[in-house]
Image: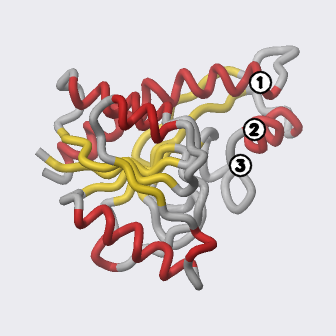
Amino acid sequence: MKRLALFISGTGGNALSLLRACREGRVPALPVLGLASTAKAGGIPRLEAEGIPTTVLVRKDFESDEAFSEACYQAAEKAGAEVICLCGWLKKLAVPARWEGRILNIHPGLLPQFGGPGMYGMHVHQAVLAAGEAESGATVHLVDGEYDHGRILQQMRVPVLPGDTPEDLQKRVYAAEMELYPLALAAYLTETA
């Protein structure tokens, strides 16, 4: 059974969803670490309440993205993690060869559209509505050296409804994320077993 590190920057909703899926046997993995990019992340106490050890690493404490990324990977490795799942993680990670193909991310849009620097959270939903798209959704992809760029593993589509606000669309996409990430992670773990 693969050991997971869950990287968070916010409330930890996707991390808790993956944790639940692992404990219910829907994902053949064991979460061993929650790593937050800010001490203010609401997901820290939520993961700790579930018995998951957490640590905080803040980008400004490091001289470069590479040094920050390396500290994150070392924390994951120290916990015995073999796969990293980014769950609302907002910091750029430089991906060394030893972690290529072992970092997954969930994005609140249908990549390759509406991805890249600055395209996260409500910014994605605002852009989708501004573009007049008929649908949006969530994407799980492998992480490489570029924002929102690596191989797409799975997507789930949701309709954009007439009169939608960014908040309306966000709720629908978030529900899709909760369903998609465990499915995509389970398929990835089976494929790479």
Callout 3 secondary element: loop
Task: Please say if the residues under marks 2 and 1 sit with CB atoms less than 8 Å apart.
Answer: yes
How many C-alpha atoms fall within 10 Å of the one at disc 3: few (<14), some, or many (≥20)?
Answer: many
Task: Look at label 3 and name its amino acid.
Answer: Phe
Tell me, yes or no, whether the two marked residues, 3 and 2, touch with CB atoms within 8 Å. no
Quadrant holding the N terminus: top left
Q: Which residue sits at x=45%, y=61%?
A: 143
Residue at 30 percent of width and 62 percent of height: 76
Circle 1 residue: 167
Residue ID for mark 2: 122
Point out the tag, 3 or 2, that comes first from the N-terminus.
Answer: 3
Q: Which residue is mark 3?
A: 114
According to the image, what is the colour scheme of the structure?
secondary structure
Residue 69 vertical placement versus 45 (above, below): below
Could you give the CA–CA distance between mark 3 and mark 2, rounded to whole angstroms? 11 Å
Q: Residue furthest top?
A: 162
Looking at the rendered structure, the kind of residue marked 1 is Glu
The earlier-in-sequence mark between 3 and 1 is 3
